Amino acid sequence: SSHAGSKGIFALSMTTRLHTRAVVCSLVVVHWAQTHPGWIRPTLRPRHNFVGYLVQSLSFAQGVDPSAHRCSGRAARRIQQQIALHANHGVVEETSPADVDAAVLAGGLVVVDLYADWCFPCKMLKPTLSTFADRLLNYARKTGMSCSDWPRVFSIDTDAFPDTTVRFRADGLPMIVVFKDGTERGRLEGAVSLDELESLVAGVLGLEAGFAGLHSVGRVESMEELELAVQLEDTLVLSILAGGEDASAALESALEMLPQKLRAQPAARVVAVDATMLPPVISFSGISQVPAVLLYDHGSCVATLQGEEVTGVSSGSLAQVVNSFFKPC
């Protein structure tokens, strides 16, 4: 019996060591898998292989999407490229001259903004540029343009890249340079208006009617940008939303059609601010309820609609209210 007992202890010891080695090896493989995402082929699903299961479990624990580990390396890179492509359109991309070169060589429409942090006219141009990027995105979507051909709007910090001003022959800042089909098609210097910028790019794109009917709601992401917009725009419609709330979502849908129904002269600019992302906007606007819509005429607030006044409002009824305060065309 003592011999049988020693055999049992030996077998248990061997089993324990084998399990320990298996766990250690598995952890090593999991670590390698995490540092080399995409190595597990799509056919080896986590529920069919032990290592895949460990990768999935550890990914959930770390808040990582486990599906990233189930793609091949090439597929993962392709997905990442598509995500980056969609994320960068409709925004002003802070970038380097090398990235601009690549975009220009691709042949699409590229708008480059050269600026410096110490340049006040550059700061004045940023809200205009942000709205223009939104309108370009709206143009690309409504005309059925292929995603790979969508326009790009870049900003380059000339202090970070000192050779940029010489290379782009920029005598002053800010400088807007427009490229199409790999060549420069035009440029503007100074804190130009939205109309001037749209006119230049519409000419490059061959849009005889300009961007009429293709306007969209701009996004404001900083208080500095908002304050400049209020001061510089002749007519401004400011919508303050609360991300995730049904009332804000309904108002946002109505706002999408609003720019096409306004009759203000010059054309009113419509911008939206997420109060959950930019809390100081509440005290700045003086509102007590969200969502809200404020109308500014030459820097002065002429009307405020908030809470139930804008809950469930249609774009048509909202346009009637806005048009009643602004000089018609």
Image (cartoon, rainbow, N blue to C red):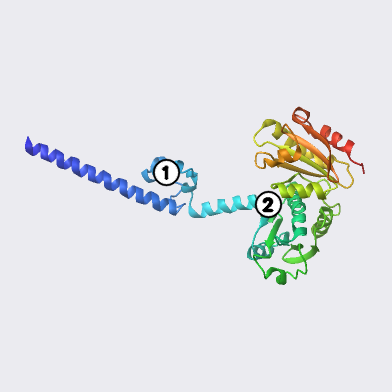
The vertical placement of 110 against 270, above or below, is: below
Residue 272's spot in the image, x, y percent?
73, 42
The vertical placement of 241 against 223, above or below, is: above
Residue 157's spot in the image, x, y percent?
68, 62
Residue 293's spot in the image, x, y percent?
78, 36
Q: Which residue is mark 1?
A: 58
Tell me where residue 61 sits by quadrant: top left
Residue 214 in sight here: no
Q: Amino acid at mark 1?
A: Leu
Residue sitting at 15 percent across and 42 percent down?
Answer: 10
Mark 1 residue element: helix
Residue sitting at 23 percent across and 45 percent down?
Answer: 17
The vertical placement of 200 against 44, above or below, is: below
The front one of 41 and 212 is 212
The mark that comes first in sequence, 2 or 1, is 1
Q: Amino acid at mark 2?
A: His
Tell me where residue 305 sits by quadrant: top right
Residue sitting at 74 percent across and 63 percent down?
Answer: 179
Disc tally is: 2
Residue 225 in sight here: yes
Residue sitting at 63 percent across and 53 percent down?
Answer: 85
Label 1 packing within 10 angstroms: few (<14), some (14-19), many (20+): some
- Residue 8 is left or right of residue 61, and the answer is left
Quarter of the picture containing the C terminus is top right
Q: Which residue is mark 2?
A: 89
Mark 2 residue element: loop
Estimate the spatial distance between the alpha carbons at disc 2 and disc 1, rounded to whole Å: 33 Å
Quarter of the picture containing the N terminus is top left
The front one of 62 and 299 is 299
Marks 2 & 1, CB-CB < 8 Å contact:
no
Tell me where residue 271 sits by quadrant: top right
Label 2 packing within 10 angstroms: few (<14), some (14-19), many (20+): many
